[in-house]
Image (tube, helix red, strand yellow):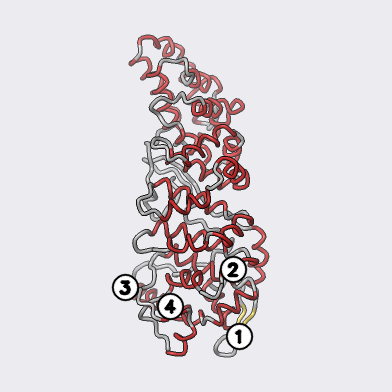
């Protein structure tokens, strides 16, 4: 499944899915039909081996003999056309549910062969990276093996850094998977081989002519914000370069990447004073997706808002993924005293009130029209930014690439404590927020009206 899923169709998925047994059988049959010199290979696939393939794969097992036979054709010494066919089938095989088992079998025999082909530049016209991308999408053990292959990681970093025409996109996708599972290790590799990765990635995201690979580097950066030092570095040096990316009308995908980064930066309480400075640029940018020119605000409420929002003529964002993450970011800002006080002084409550009213009105209208609707804001209990962390294998498309914003562990306890806070509502009654019976939006509103 491609990273950055935004709808039921997902992102660009390559290749076609095929079952494991069928792939092996068609592989040998094709070799026998297309190459006179390899008819012996077809003969080796005896009836017993065919039976073994079907039964072992049916039981989700792995036959070492079958893997050994396949890997023989991945050798640089094998005829180029035959090796090409073997690579094509391996890439197709990587769509299967149990490719991770095959990748690890016999002490990573297949994984080692694929990595060697890439590192030695023996892949001819085929990009082998998709097979490794699929293996590392959800399986941590496979991701660990690839991450520990210093030469392969270095080559992927070089492809991405140098904007290699053939391999930069898939290299960025693989780096995305590795950054999901082992962000610290990948960050160390990036610091070593691409010292300016962070400013370069942000610059490419800001470039309207940038290629698709830039978005995947953006996902790498999102995953790296699970590291406290990276969050602090972004807060101190790169906030202003990230803010222009929050443009949901023209670049929604890039906007969501930026919102993910900004949201994770809000987990760093020590940096709230940097984010919430006197110019209100960060806060205004974060709030614009929730604001609307038609909000019913009186003059006194408008005057207290950040200057950039006092005469706002735009309309609120309709992308629920962006909206949810903005609410979560504001909620994390309430984790510090300076964050809560700033949001209260800037009268953010009034904007949230109008947003809540508009959302409730829209929901009521949908219900009246007998349409299935879900609440605009849902409580994300584990604090994971996971809209682009889902991985599945589509029936006809098989490219898996996963990226998630890592849960920032040190904030879990603080968030849990905040959810149990009591506050006094407008009616004067004491309301308790338990984190389950109230949306994040209402919990946030409660924190802002608490004395």
Q: Check disc 1: other Cα within 10 Å, few if <14, some if 14-19, many if 20+.
A: some
* Residue nearest the viewer, comparing 31 with 292: 292
Distance between the Cα atoms at labels 2 and 4?
20 Å
Nearer the observer: mark 1 or 3; the answer is: 1
Residue 395 on image: x %, y %: 39, 42
Checking the image for residue 274, the label placed there is 2
Q: Which residue occupies 48% across, 50% down? A: 201
Nearer the observer: mark 3 or 4; the answer is: 4
Distance between the Cα atoms at labels 1 and 4?
27 Å
Distance between the Cα atoms at labels 1 and 3?
35 Å
**Quadrant placement of the N terminus:** top left
Task: Report the residue marked by disc 1.
Answer: 424
Q: Is residue 49 above or below residue 131?
A: above
* Residue nearest the viewer, comparing 435 with 309: 309
**Can see residue 174?**
yes
Q: Is residue 220 above or below residue 411?
A: above
Nearer the observer: mark 2 or 4; the answer is: 2
Is residue 340 toward the left or the right of residue 284 in the image? right
Checking the image for residue 369, the label placed there is 3
Disc 1 to disc 4: CB gap under 8 Å: no
Checking the image for residue 309, the label placed there is 4
Q: Which residue occupies 54% across, 27% down? A: 62
Residue 229 on image: x %, y %: 63, 55
Q: Is residue 70 above or below residue 335?
A: above
Distance between the Cα atoms at labels 3 and 4?
33 Å
């Amino acid at each position: 499944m491609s990273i950055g899923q935004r709808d039921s169709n997902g992102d660009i998925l390559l290749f076609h899915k095929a079952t494991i047994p069928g792939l092996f059988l068609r592989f040998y049959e094709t070799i026998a039909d297309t190459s006179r010199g390899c008819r012996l290979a077809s003969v080796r696939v005896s009836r017993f081996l065919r039976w073994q393939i079907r039964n072992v794969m049916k039981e989700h097992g792995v036959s070492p003999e079958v893997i050994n036979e396949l890997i023989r054709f991945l050798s640089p010494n094998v005829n180029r056309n035959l090796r090409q066919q073997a690579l094509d089938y391996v890439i197709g095989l990587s769509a299967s549910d149990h490719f991770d088992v095959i990748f690890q079998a016999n002490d990573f025999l297949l994984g080692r062969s694929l990595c060697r082909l890439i590192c030695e530049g023996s892949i001819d016209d085929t990009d082998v990276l998709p097979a490794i991308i699929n293996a590392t999408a959800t399986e941590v053990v496979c991701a660990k093996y690839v991450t520990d292959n210093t030469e392969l990681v270095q080559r992927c970093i070089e492809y991405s850094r140098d904007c290699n025409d053939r391999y930069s996109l898939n290299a960025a996708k693989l780096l995305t998977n590795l950054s999901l599972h082992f962000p610290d290790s990948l960050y160390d590799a990036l610091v070593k081989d691409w010292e300016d990765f962070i400013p370069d990635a942000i610059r490419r995201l800001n470039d309207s002519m940038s290629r698709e690979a830039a978005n995947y580097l953006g996902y790498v950066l999102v995953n790296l914000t699970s590291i406290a030092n990276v969050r602090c570095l972004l807060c101190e040096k790169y906030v202003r370069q990230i803010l222009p990316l929050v443009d949901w009308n023209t670049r929604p995908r890039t906007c969501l990447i930026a919102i993910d980064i900004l949201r994770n930066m809000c987990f760093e309480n020590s940096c709230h004073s940097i984010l919430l400075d006197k110019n209100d640029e960060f806060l205004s940018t974060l709030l614009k997706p929730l604001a609307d020119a038609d909000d019913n605000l009186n003059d006194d409420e408008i005057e207290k808002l950040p200057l950039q929002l006092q005469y706002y003529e735009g309309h609120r964002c309709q992308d629920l993924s962006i909206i949810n993450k903005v609410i979560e970011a504001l909620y994390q800002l309430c984790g510090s005293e300076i964050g809560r006080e700033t949001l209260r002084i800037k009268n953010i409550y009034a904007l949230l009130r109008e947003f809540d009213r508009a959302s409730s009105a829209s929901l009521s209208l949908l219900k009246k029209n007998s349409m299935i609707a879900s609440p605009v804001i849902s409580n994300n209990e584990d604090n994971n930014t996971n809209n682009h962390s889902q991985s599945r294998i589509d029936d006809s498309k098989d490219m898996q690439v996963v990226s998630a914003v890592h849960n920032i562990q040190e904030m879990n306890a603080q968030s849990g404590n905040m959810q149990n806070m009591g506050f006094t509502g407008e009616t004067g009654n004491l309301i308790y927020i338990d984190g389950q019976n109230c949306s994040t939006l209402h919990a946030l509103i409660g924190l802002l009206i608490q004395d």
